C-alpha cells in the first residue's frame, strides 16, 4: 500500500514539473473600429493559430466585445470562444463592464459568471482579477476582491510559478510613468506591486492598451499583450505565448497572420 501511495506521489510531482504552454489573448473587442464582421475574421484567425499550439489553457483578459449591451457582438464572441480547444478563462474589460453602470456588471455575470478566477495547472497558480473596480475607484467591490486576492496569493506561495491576470495594466513600461487611461494610479501601483512582491508573484499579464509592452520591476515581469482585435501599433494584432519549462518561463508576443 505504501509503495502505491509513493508511486502516486511521484506521478503527481512529475506532472507539476512538466513543461507546458499557455496563451494569453486579450481585447478581441468584437465590433471595435473595424466592425463586427472584420473583428470576427480576426478572432477566428487567432483562434486557429492558438489551437495549432495545443496550449494547456487560454486566458482572455477582457474587452471581449466593444459594447457591453450588444447581443450581436456577444454572439460572435461566444462562437469564436467555443472554437478554442483548450480550457478558457476570461476576465472583464472596461468595455464589458461600464463605469457607473451596474446593469453592465449584472449582464456580464449572467453571460460569463464571476469576474475573477483562481486555478492550478501543472503546479502553477493562475489568478485573475477584475481591474475595473480598481481603476474606477469602486471601493466596496475592490475591497471585497482584495481580501479574496490575498487569500489566493497566500495559498499560492508554494506554487511552481504564480501568474496574475487583469485587463488594465498596473504599469506599461516604468514604475514612475504618468497616470493615464492605460495604467493604475501611483498609489494603486505601489499597493498591488507590494502585494505581488510579498507573495512571490512571477508575472502579471494584462491588455487594454492595444499595443504590446513588457517590462520588469522589483523582480516581477509585467506583460501587456497587444489585441486579438484592432491594434493601435501598425496593426500588430496577436497574443502572448507563454512556455513554462522546468527552470523558468518565456513570454513571446506572436502576431496573427491575417
Image (cartoon, rainbow, N blue to C red):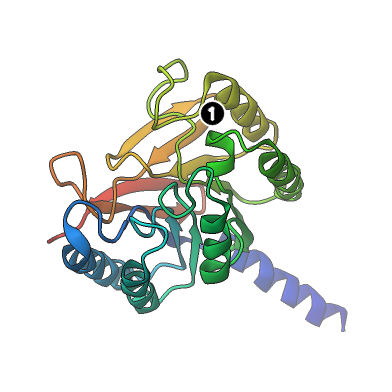
Q: x, y percentage for residue 172? A: 39, 30
| Residue placed most toward the observer, 57 or 61 | 61
Pointer 1: residues within 10 angstroms few (<14), some, or many (20+)?
Answer: few
Q: Residue at x 21, y 46 (%)?
A: 231
Q: x, y percentage for residue 43? A: 26, 65
Q: Residue at x 56, y 70 (%)?
A: 110
In this rendering, does residue 123 appear at all? Answer: no
**Rendering quarter of residue 10:** bottom right
4 versus 117 height, above or below: below
In this rendering, does residue 243 appear at all? Answer: yes
73 versus 145 height, above or below: below
**Rendering quarter of residue 125:** bottom right
148 versus 178 height, above or below: below
Q: x, y percentage for residue 118? A: 64, 58
Left or right: where 213 falls relative to 42 = right
User: Residue tagged by mark 1?
Assistant: 219
If the image is split into quadrants, where does the C terminus sit? bottom left
Left or right: where 15 falls relative to 90 = right
Left or right: where 82 falls relative to 157 = left
| Residue placed most toward the observer, 87 or 30 | 30
Instruction: Tell me the SS state at disc 1.
Output: loop
Q: Residue at x 53, y 19 (%)?
A: 186
Amino acid at each position: 500500500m505504501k509503495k502505491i501511495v509513493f508511486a502516486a506521489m511521484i506521478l503527481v510531482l512529475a506532472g507539476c514539473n512538466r513543461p507546458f504552454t499557455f496563451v494569453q489573448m486579450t481585447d478581441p473587442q468584437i465590433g471595435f473600429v473595424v466592425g463586427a464582421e472584420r473583428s470576427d475574421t480576426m478572432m477566428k484567425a487567432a483562434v486557429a493559430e492558438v489551437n495549432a499550439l495545443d496550449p494547456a489553457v487560454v486566458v482572455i483578459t477582457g474587452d471581449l466585445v466593444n459594447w457591453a449591451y450588444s447581443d450581436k457582438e456577444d454572439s460572435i464572441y461566444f462562437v469564436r470562444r467555443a472554437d478554442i480547444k483548450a480550457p478558457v478563462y476570461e476576465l472583464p474589460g472596461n468595455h464589458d463592464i461600464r463605469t457607473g453602470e451596474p446593469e453592465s456588471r449584472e449582464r456580464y455575470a449572467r453571460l460569463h459568471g464571476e469576474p475573477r478566477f483562481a486555478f492550478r495547472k501543472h503546479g502553477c497558480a493562475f489568478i485573475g482579477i477584475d481591474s475595473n473596480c480598481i481603476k474606477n475607484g469602486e471601493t466596496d467591490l475592490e475591497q471585497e476582491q482584495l481580501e479574496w486576492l490575498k487569500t489566493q496569493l497566500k495559498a499560492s506561495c508554494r506554487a511552481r510559478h504564480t501568474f496574475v491576470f487583469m485587463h488594465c495594466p498596473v504599469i506599461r513600461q516604468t514604475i514612475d510613468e504618468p497616470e493615464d487611461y492605460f495604467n493604475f494610479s501611483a498609489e494603486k501601483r505601489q499597493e498591488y506591486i507590494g502585494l505581488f512582491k510579498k507573495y512571490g508573484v512571477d508575472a502579471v499579464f494584462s491588455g487594454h492598451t492595444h499595443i504590446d509592452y513588457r517590462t520588469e520591476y522589483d523582480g516581477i515581469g509585467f506583460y501587456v499583450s497587444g489585441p486579438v482585435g484592432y491594434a493601435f501599433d501598425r496593426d500588430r494584432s496577436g497574443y502572448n505565448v507563454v512556455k513554462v519549462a522546468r527552470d523558468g518561463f518565456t513570454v513571446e508576443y506572436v502576431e496573427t497572420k491575417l
